[in-house]
């Protein structure tokens, strides 16, 4: 029997980490992810876990230490947000290029500047092409479940890539909600032991990690990373199937909510999906065929599956919680529209930048997006595909 | 057993092998080779390298010069990277996931990767008390990228970012005293050394550093023929002059107590060290005597400070 609890997203993540019992956790405090290493160091102090907790002096060192620990042959985890991830940026690329299945909990927050501590996805978007698997979580339950699945995916021999589990800062990380936990022994069995093929501490087979890799080989090595990322898709599906057998909770590459017969749809990630579902339920009562595609697996991006799933709708709004500042739309918008283009599917699509720096996104805001989509379907016209949602207008107080 | 270089070389095969691509006359390879020889033959090592000459010349895919396990990640984080590996060792050892036997952890970084960009990572690793040795091979500039000044570059040295020009005569600042910064971390073992007198001092300090429990730091001068401008066969002579002029004193600090390991009977004037090096050539031009005087004064004052520290820290 699963355990019913009430936990915040950070507590849920720390609980998952406790059950995973990694060999090393190296972390540095940064709002809103600070609580994760805080709770975890209590588990260490009380002997609840076997982990060596390395209280590093920066996030750059947190990721460096995770790389050293994982390369040594151990399981290493960390957590961070925003500028912490920015400071790790150099090491984020090195972690994936060394094919080290480190697991990171990213509690999404706006990257400076100016300084802001609240939620948006600019931190995650800054590492979207770094070779990390990126899973997004709507709520505490999904943050917990994704974390439990993380090592099985990352450590799979066809993958061997680092993985980050994203959840919205404060909205998810600090909100206490109901959650179903898996029993410790079941988690232990599900996650299994990490048995790396090659590792620094194996004195029977000394290895060298992180060479100077010049014109003759770097191209092939980067391509191997790309292949591993492609392989990850099937592994994620397989692991999710096993997870469903254990918990009854079903996870795919993305979630379709009322999408099957939808005429208008929103594509978004993380907690905004919850608000969107609430709005959809209301619209459906009025006979409006609104739907949602909630991305869970952002990297690898499920190109063909997303395109196919949206092929029947008449208009789509893609919601980006980070502005790409490129005069060409947000990252998710580019990924979704590009996926549809290469699949030869043409559906009217608009982009909304929203929720920057923790700007509240209310049900009314989401409803206004569906109203816009209805207008697009009616007029068959898009005057401006690059839009803002919840932005102050001139004269607003 | 008394140190004998022939015995050491004969009985301890090199763990830093031939075939690497470091320059002839470079001070760093003999340093790395001899430090690795200070390991007990039965002990295994995980070595970390900061980006720099040594790393890019000893591990070019698919070749490595290291017979123990080696990891390089980036320029500024050899300290944190090795700290992570050491933490993994402690954790896995405690959990019974590793076989019997000792593994030692040694990091190598140049002065750029240690005094400058890697200082924070080094400080963190030392403060947290990881059981590891960090070795800085100090050649006094960013040699790998083409001889740019670092905070370890001596005053007046001509580098590509502190060129001896018509108005500014080379680097205008004194060098940072990294060993003292490490002493400020209250480490069980800090030492400054170089290859001199059959490498005895270097070997014995490496052995102490490796086999002292907890964090240890070695600052090792490693001349660079390209950056310093000396003939490649003069490496050992440059090392000798650095010690005999007291430019690079040999000392160790054990649990806070200073010990100067070599006091020249007759301290040579600093010109002896400066003259054979092209980077100081402008100091010997007419009207530039003041630079040599200033340099000498600084060397004297730092040497005196060291003598004082030895006296003060060994009082009953």
Image (cartoon, rainbow, N blue to C red):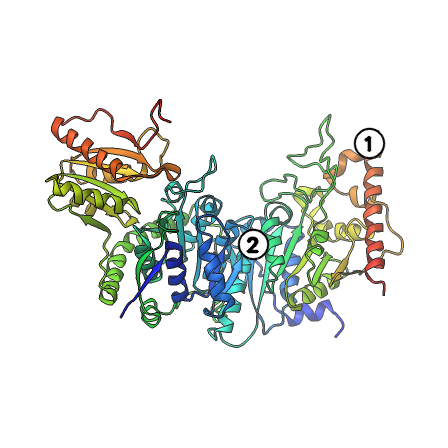
Q: Residues within 10 Å of mark 2 (few under 14, many from 20)?
A: many
Question: In the image, is residue A95 above or below residue A267?
Answer: below
- Which of the image's four quarters has the C terminus of chain A? top left
- Earlier sequence position, callout 1 versus callout 2: 2
Q: Residue at x 51, y 72 (%)?
A: B93
Q: Is residue A311 visible?
A: no
Q: Is residue A341 above or below residue B45?
A: above
Chain at numbered mark 2: B
Q: Is residue A78 left or right of residue B269?
A: left
> Alpha-carbon distance for marks 1 and 2?
40 Å
Q: On the picture, is A144 further left or further right than B20?
A: left
Of tags 1 and 2, the one toward the viewer is 2
Looking at the rendered structure, which numbered label has been put on residue B78? 2
Which quadrant of the view contains residue A236?
A: bottom left
Residue at 84 percent of width and 29 percent of height: B287
Give the quarter of the figure containing the N terminus of chain A. Answer: bottom left
Q: Is A297 left, or right, of A92 in this rendering?
A: left
**B224 or B140, which is in the foreground?**
B140
Q: Nearer the viewer, residue A250 or B23?
A: A250
Q: How many marks?
A: 2
Q: Are marks 1 and 2 in contact (CB under 8 Å)?
A: no
On the image, the x and y values in percent for residue A333 come to 27, 37
**Residue picked out by circle 1:** B288
In the drawing, does residue A285 fall left or right of residue A50? left
Q: Secondary structure at mark 1?
A: loop
Neighbours of disc 1 within 10 Å: few (<14), some (14-19), many (20+): few
Give x and y (percent) for residue B151. 67, 42
Q: Position of residue B47 (x, y in %)?
A: 56, 61
As drawn, which residue projects farthest toward the bottom? B100
Residue B263, position as x, y percentages in the image: 85, 57
Which numbered tag is attached to residue B164? none
Residue located farthest toward the right when viewing the structure as drawn:
B266
């Amino acid at each position: 029997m699963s355990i019913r609890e009430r936990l915040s997203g950070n507590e849920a993540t720390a609980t998952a980490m406790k059950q995973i019992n990694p060999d090393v956790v190296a972390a540095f405090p940064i709002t809103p992810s600070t609580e994760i290493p805080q709770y975890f160091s209590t588990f260490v102090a009380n002997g609840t876990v076997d982990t060596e907790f390395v209280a590093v002096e920066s996030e750059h060192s947190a990721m460096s230490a995770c790389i050293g620990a994982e390369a040594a042959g151990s399981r290493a985890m960390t957590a961070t947000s925003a500028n912490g991830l920015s400071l790790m940026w150099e090491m984020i690329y090195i972690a994936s290029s060394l094919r080290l299945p480190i697991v990171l909990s990213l509690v999404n927050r706006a990257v400076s500047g100016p300084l802001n501590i609240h939620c948006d996805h600019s931190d995650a978007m800054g590492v979207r092409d770094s070779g990390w698997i990126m899973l997004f979580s709507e709520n505490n339950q999904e943050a917990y479940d994704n974390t439990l699945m993380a090592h099985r995916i990352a450590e799979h021999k066809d993958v061997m890539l680092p993985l980050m589990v994203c959840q919205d800062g404060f909205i998810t990380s600090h909100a206490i909600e109901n959650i179903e936990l898996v029993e410790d022994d079941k988690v232990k069995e599900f996650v299994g032991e990490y048995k790396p093929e090659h590792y620094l501490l194996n004195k029977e087979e000394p290895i060298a990690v992180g060479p100077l890799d010049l014109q003759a080989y770097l191209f092939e090595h980067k391509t191997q990373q790309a292949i591993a990322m492609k392989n990850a898709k099937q592994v994620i599906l397989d692991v999710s199937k096993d997870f469903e057998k254990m918990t009854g909770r079903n996870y795919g590459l993305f979630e379709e909510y009322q999408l099957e017969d939808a005429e208008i749809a929103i594509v978004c990630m993380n907690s905004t999906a919850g608000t969107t579902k609430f709005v959809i339920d209301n619209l459906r009562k009025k006979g409006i065929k609104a739907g949602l595609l909630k991305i869970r697996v952002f990297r690898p991006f499920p190109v063909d599956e997303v395109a196919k799933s949206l092929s029947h709708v008449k208009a789509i709004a893609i919601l980006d919680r980070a502005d790409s500042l490129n005069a060409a739309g947000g990252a998710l918008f580019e990924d979704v529209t590009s996926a549809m283009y290469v699949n030869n599917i043409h559906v009217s699509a608009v982009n909304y930048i929203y929720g920057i720096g923790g700007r509240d996104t209310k049900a009314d805001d989401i409803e206004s997006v569906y109203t816009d989509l209805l207008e697009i379907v009616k007029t068959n016209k898009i005057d401006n595909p690059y839009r803002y949602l919840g932005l102050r207008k001139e004269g607003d107080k | 057993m008394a140190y004998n270089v022939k015995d050491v070389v004969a009985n301890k095969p090199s763990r830093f092998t031939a075939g690497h691509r470091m320059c002839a006359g470079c001070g760093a390879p003999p340093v790395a080779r001899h430090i690795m020889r200070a390991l007990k033959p039965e002990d295994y090592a995980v070595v970390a390298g900061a980006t720099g000459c040594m790393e890019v010349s000893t591990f070019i895919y698919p070749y490595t010069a290291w017979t123990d396990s080696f990891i390089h990640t980036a320029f500024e984080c050899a300290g944190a990277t090795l700290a992570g590996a050491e933490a993994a060792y402690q954790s896995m050892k405690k959990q019974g996931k590793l076989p019997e036997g000792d593994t030692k952890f040694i990091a190598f970084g140049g002065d750029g990767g240690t005094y400058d960009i890697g200082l924070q990572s080094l400080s963190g690793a030392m403060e947290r008390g990881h059981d590891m040795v960090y070795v800085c091979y100090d050649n006094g500039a960013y040699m790998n990228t083409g001889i740019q000044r670092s905070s370890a570059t001596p005053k007046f040295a001509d580098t590509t970012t502190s060129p001896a020009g018509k108005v500014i005569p080379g680097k205008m600042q004194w060098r940072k005293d990294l060993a003292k910064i490490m002493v400020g971390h209250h480490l069980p073992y800090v030492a400054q050394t170089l290859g001199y007198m059959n490498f005895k001092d270097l070997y014995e300090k490496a052995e102490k550093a490796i086999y002292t429990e907890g964090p240890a730091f070695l600052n090792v001068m490693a001349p660079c023929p390209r950056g310093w401008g000396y003939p490649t066969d003069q490496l050992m002579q440059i090392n000798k002059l650095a010690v005999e002029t007291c430019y690079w004193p040999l000392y160790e600090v054990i649990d806070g107590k200073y010990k100067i390991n070599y006091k020249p009977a007759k301290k040579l004037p600093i010109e002896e060290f400066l003259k054979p090096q092209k980077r100081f050539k402008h100091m010997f031009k007419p009207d530039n005597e003041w630079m040599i005087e200033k340099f000498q004064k600084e060397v004297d004052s730092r040497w005196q400070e060291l003598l004082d520290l030895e006296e003060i820290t060994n009082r009953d």
